[in-house]
Amino acid sequence: MKAVGYKVPGPISADAALVDIDLPRPVAAGGDILVEVKAVSVNPVDYKIRSSTPPADGDWKVLGWDAAGIVREVGPDVTQFTAGDEVYYAGSLIRSGANAQFHLVDARIVGRKPASLDWAEAAALPLTSLTAWEAMFDRLDVTRPVPGAAPAILIIGGAGGVGSIAVQIARQRTDLTVIATASRPETQAWVKGLGAHHVVDHARPLAAQIAELGIGAPAFVFSTTHTEQHSADIAELIAPQGRFLLIDDPKALDIMQFKRKAVSIHHELMFTRSLYGTPDMDEQGKILDALAVLVDDGKIRTTLTRKLSPINAANLKTVHALIESGATKGKIALEGF
């Protein structure tokens, strides 16, 4: 089968950063399903691993943690899917990725593809949606109020992949006032179109802009990017006893600046459940199924902003470079082999 992989981690400019290869077609066993991949999308995790992590066995490493496709085989322990089902999912960090014609994935973390979306539109959603959903409901527990705080959530990086879906989920699944950050006219318009009540500029100090809104100190802050740059502002603007979550990887974070307000600090990694085989691993399949209903009901829209075809090394290198630039909005997907 066709696939895209690498053997030596390095910059995307290197000739061998991503290579078109042929690999044996996998066979479904146990609780796995074999998916014929129709589309994939690219996330920051792809370029972070590509630039730093060699294959564990010295062979090819295949990336790709967002996919949509058709179930072609089911393992003997699988009961929720049959051959021919259309699915979407984000996969697992400790297994081979979805940049391949056929991909094995644990059925528990797979959802039924929204019927109203095409393959690329669906592939844009799983990783970011799971991240945003788990962040808000499993980590920040946004349905539990913070006493005296404004019932509001500040989403830093509102136009990015996670931010774009987080804004929508917050609007559709909570009664919170949604404040999102964006710094360019086009990204500000994008975030407003997704449903943000207020948009502030993360290129300027955030605390003063939040105060100017006149709604009070937000109960929740959800930082998707550049947390290190914004941490002092976050500590200033968040409500006492508020809850703060980050998903990026700051080189340094002074948590003591949050102690006076007794702010709780949370991390979200949507791969945690599959990395550790947690007892609630099947929650991810349930979340994706719930999201599909919201999409098909017209309440959530895909965050896809660009599509390339086919899925090959050249196109994946183009998308990796774009994602690494940090200047994209929404998601970029690739379709077809």
Image (cartoon, helix red, strand yellow):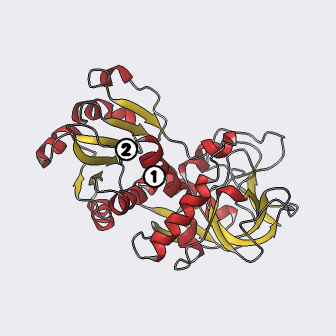
Quick check: marks 1 and 2 in contact, CB under 8 Å? Answer: yes
Residue 313: image location, x then y, percent: 69, 61
Q: Which mark is residue 223?
A: none
Q: Looking at numbered disc 2 in the image, what kind of residue is underneath it?
A: Phe
For disc 1, the marked residue is 132
Up-down: is 242 above or below 270?
above
Residue 61: image location, x then y, percent: 76, 49
- Please identify the quarter of the rendering in which residue 166 is found: bottom left
Q: Looking at numbered disc 1 in the image, what kind of residue is underneath it?
A: Ala
Residue depicted at x 74% and y 40%: 54
Figure quadrant of the N terminus: bottom right
Residue depicted at x 65% and y 38%: 52
Figure quadrant of the C terminus: bottom right
Q: In this view, does 277 lie to the left or right of 172?
A: right
- Please identify the quarter of the rendering in which residue 223 is found: top left
Q: Residue 222 carries which label?
A: 2
Q: Residues within 10 Å of mark 1 (few under 14, many from 20)?
A: many
Up-down: is 49 above or below 311?
above
Q: Is residue 242 left or right of residue 245?
A: left
Residue 272: image location, x then y, percent: 61, 41
Residue depicted at x 66% and y 49%: 14
Q: How crowded is mark 2: few (under 14 residues within 10 Å), some or many (20 or more)?
A: many
SS at circle 1? helix
